Amino acid sequence: MKQMIVHSTQHMTRMALLENGKLVEYAAERDQQQGLVGSFYKARVINVLPGMQAAFVDIGQKKNAFLYVDDVLHPHLEKQPAVKPSIETLLQPGQDIVVQVRKEPRGGKGARVTTHYTLPGRWIVFMPFAEYVGVSKKINRESERNRLKGIGERLRRAEEGIIMRTVSEDQPQEAVGGDLAFLRAQWDHISRRALSSEVPALLHSDLSIVQRFIRDAFNPERDELVLDSAKAAKEAEVFLDDMAPGGYKPVRLYSGKESILTAYGVQEQLHRGFARKIMLEGGATLIWDEAEALTVIDVNTAQYTGGASLEETVTRTNLLAAEEIGRLIRLRDTGGIIIIDFIDMEQEEHRRMVTDCLERVISKDRTKTHILGWTRLGLLEMTRKKARHDSTGFAPAICPCCGGTGKSGNWHE
């Protein structure tokens, strides 16, 4: 069972996702600072850089957005030319173009944008110009994959593309068709606004964090949504009724005296989950160090002595660590390259057990994650896509003296 806990204040909404009481996702959003990912803009090309095969476009933010040549070519790989053309033949300075944000601005970098437009619904992802039907890889039954692909081919228009989401499994054609009709209308609205708007202009914003979760991962038949704001609860009920009408009542208003995040154990789990040193069951530890595009996780037995032999102790420790690392990667929304230094194991079978355990846990993650395998040094290498900001409102502040290194920059003789 999943529980979504939502704490609302005057200026911020904080959302925590619990699976069987364990915190697996956390996000926060300021009311006036909703993320850009998924939003559509009417933009103007400012610079075209042939050496980078990219362009910078003005979307009305502090930094110009970055548009790579691959995001200008046709979204269907089979429709792209065999030799990639120069960006100069595709875009010109001063040209107006509709773009969608695929990655938030970060540090000194502007947002990453694309012309491969996607509009996610409850059952499908609609792509106005993709010209193909895809089915989620998490749907394993070949007969069901073929059925869903057939539905998509019957419903789509010639230029359109559809991806059948994991939750579309066993859904009737009528449900998928209703979703498609809604998303087509949304795209038509964006197109009409683009024709009448001055550059730069926001044409369409993605949903709030609560609505995104309801759309992407909430099952009203078995999951629970608990909020501490009557206004937010009413808005969630209206959105849920529009998305999945069926008379379900999974929305509950919390009225306890203590904070909802404290009452459901979220605050305590946040402090443990975002620490640099994380204690595991039995005394083993994880040391979690992050750079901008690289995260290194070190596994230590510490006080754990649970096996009959060294190899058994090491394997048990690594299995415990893999389970927790899979959960924490999702909770901390860790992105980029991830290197895990598990304790050395002698047997290939044990390494495979650890990999299988990690894959099982991350299979629940909606963010694309790929385990590359073991390096020659015995490190496990993986990558995880990250589009949005860090968890606003909780991520620990960087120390102004040491910059997060733990070492002072003031050296004295």
Image: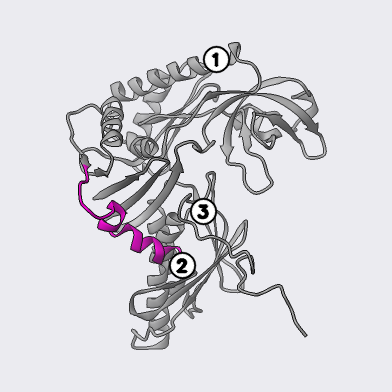
Q: Position of residue 299 (x, y in %)?
A: 48, 75
At a point 70% along the width and 34% down the height, the residue shown is 64
Residue at the far right: name it. Answer: 51
158 left or right, relative to 244: right
Is 261 covered by the magenta stretch? yes
Pointer 1 residue: 193
Numbered disc 2: secondary structure: loop
Pointer 3 residue: 370
Q: Which residues are magenta?
A: 253-275
Q: CA distance from mark 2 to mark 1?
A: 45 Å
Whether residue 326 is situated above or below residue 137 in the rendered picture = below
At a point 44% along the width and 37% down the height, the residue shown is 31
77 left or right, relative to 322: right
* Front residue of this view, candidates 108 and 359: 108
Numbered disc 1: secondary structure: helix
Whether residue 125 is situated above or below residue 221 in the rendered picture = above
Circle 2: residue type: Ala
**Neighbour class for label 2 at 10 Å: few (<14), some, many (≥20)?**
some
Pointer 2 residue: 275
Circle 3: residue type: His
